[in-house]
């Protein structure tokens, strides 16, 4: 078997798609394949550690299934495929997104398609590259249910008319009776989740405006500056009720990126530069001095924000799309996860909060904001 990996240039992309008939994958490929071993880096599939590939019998599409290796978060994506000159060519999502740039004469990236020599021998599929590396798959009946992703639909949504942009890095917040968003103007805006109405902004503070959680009526916020190892408990009006420096006070310096108050303890998450890993800190912030009760490894770049909900920590993740997942801090992984509905072009989920037994997600749609309700 000739062994060649072709990372297709822009010329190859134009040629292949000009001649592509958009037929299904070769009949021998149709079905589900479980990865047995691989010396090839298959991360371009966008699902972390690939476990299964499934080829449609009616469309030129491959479905990829995998896990984020550190926290076991499931990933499921699909990609266009083409069989040309004994090559199996994968066109990941980013590649498909670039197709319109061909006609618009915009700057064109190189290495868009990934093509492998392939061979099907009975129930074995082998991919090979030019360096002699191979990936071997065995045919199976289907992707097991625990490896498949589940879509969670929103139960409701409301447009949100914020007078200013949200402060970058701020979470959607809950004080137990209503939701809040902190704007880039340093003011906190109350939100009625039932109607989406936004109240008048109230002064919070100066640079410490990037709020990650609330404790009662106070905001835990960082400055998103320097090493970002400090967080302050700030009241409306700007009074500082408490300050936690993860280095000086806790002896475990992290770059704070997210946090949640669980009713008795403060959770903080960020990168520990000394160990080069991301950690969850469990802090008794009511004690003086503040007490670090536990350090738990939760080493992923995919977590964006999290909140305490129904006795558990739930996080907003960006991996193979947007996902909502329950954290198991002690195990350093997620226990269950749901794929969130795709937003309009350019839309992003920004924050997560719990209120009255429901999870609320803040999203940005082009220039507008919206609140979505979910009940996992």
Image (tube, rainbow, N blue to C red):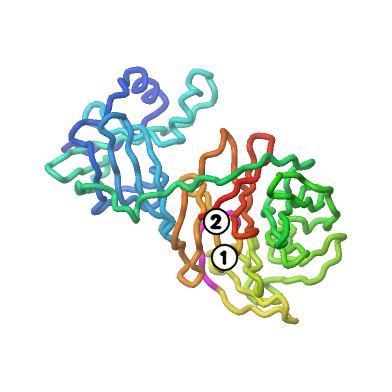
Compared to 223, does 29 lie above or below? above
Q: Position of residue 283 (x, y in %)?
A: 65, 75
Q: Position of residue 98 (x, y in %)?
A: 48, 28
Q: Position of residue 127 (x, y in %)?
A: 24, 42
Q: Position of residue 75 (x, y in %)?
A: 41, 49
Compared to 370, does 113 lie above or below? above
Q: Residues within 10 Å of mark 2 (few under 14, many from 20)?
A: many
Q: Is residue 84 magenta?
A: no
Query: Which region is colored magenta?
Result: 296-305
30 displayed left or right of 11 = left
Q: Quadrant of the N terminus?
A: top left
Q: Residue at x 57, y 77 (%)?
A: 294
Residue 225 shows in the view: no
Q: Residue at x 80, y 56 (%)?
A: 207
> Which is more toward the observer, 286 or 45?
286
Q: Residues within 10 Å of mark 1 (few under 14, many from 20)?
A: some
Q: Which mark is residue 303?
A: 2
Q: Earlier in the sequence, mark 1 or mark 2?
A: 2
154 displayed left or right of 27 = right
Q: Residue at x 40, y 36 (%)?
A: 92
Q: Which mark is residue 354?
A: none
Q: CA distance from mark 1 to mark 2?
A: 19 Å
Q: Picture quarter containing residue 25?
A: top left
Q: Residue at x 52, y 49 (%)?
A: 318
41 displayed left or right of 4 = right
Q: Picture quarter containing residue 32?
A: top left
Q: Which mark is residue 310?
A: 1
Residue 76 shows in the view: yes
User: Does dot 2 land on a helix, a strand or a loop?
Assistant: strand
């Amino acid at each position: 078997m000739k062994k060649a990996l072709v990372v297709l240039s822009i010329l190859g992309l134009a040629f292949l798609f000009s001649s592509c008939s958009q037929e299904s994958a070769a009949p021998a490929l149709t079905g589900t394949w479980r990865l047995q071993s691989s010396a090839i880096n298959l991360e371009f599939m966008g699902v972390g550690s690939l476990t299964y590939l499934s080829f449609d019998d009616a469309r030129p599409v491959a479905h990829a299934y995998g896990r984020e290796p550190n926290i076991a978060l499931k990933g499921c994506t699909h990609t266009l495929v083409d069989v040309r000159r004994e090559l199996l060519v994968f066109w990941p999502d980013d590649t498909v997104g670039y197709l319109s740039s061909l006609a618009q004469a915009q700057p064109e990236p190189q290495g868009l398609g990934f093509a492998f020599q392939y061979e099907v021998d009975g129930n074995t599929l082998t991919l090979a590259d030019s360096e002699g590396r191979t990936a071997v798959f065995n045919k199976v009946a289907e992707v097991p249910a625990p490896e498949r992703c589940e879509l969670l639909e929103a139960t409701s949504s409301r447009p949100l008319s914020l007078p200013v942009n949200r402060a970058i890095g701020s979470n959607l917040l809950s004080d137990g009776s209503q939701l809040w968003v902190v704007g880039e103007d340093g003011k906190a805006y109350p939100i009625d989740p039932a109607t989406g109405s936004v109240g008048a902004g109230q002064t919070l503070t100066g640079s410490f405006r990037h709020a990650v959680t609330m404790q009662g009526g106070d905001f835990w916020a960082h400055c998103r500056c320097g090493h970002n190892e400090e967080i302050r408990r700030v009241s409306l009006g700007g009074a500082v009720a408490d300050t936690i420096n993860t280095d000086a006070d806790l002896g475990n310096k992290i770059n704070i990126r997210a946090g949640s108050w669980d009713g008795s303890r403060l959770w903080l998450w960020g990168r520990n530069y000394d160990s080069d890993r991301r950690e969850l800190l469990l802090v008794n912030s009511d004690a003086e001095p503040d007490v670090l009760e536990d350090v738990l490894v939760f080493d992923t770049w995919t977590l964006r924000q999290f909140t305490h909900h129904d006795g558990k920590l739930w996080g907003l993740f960006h991996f193979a799309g947007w996902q909502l997942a329950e954290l198991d801090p002690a195990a350093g992984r997620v226990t269950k996860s749901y794929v969130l509905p795709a937003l309009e072009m350019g839309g992003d989920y920004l924050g997560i909060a719990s209120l009255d037994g429901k999870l609320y997600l803040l999203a940005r749609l082009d220039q507008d904001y919206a609140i979505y309700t979910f009940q996992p």
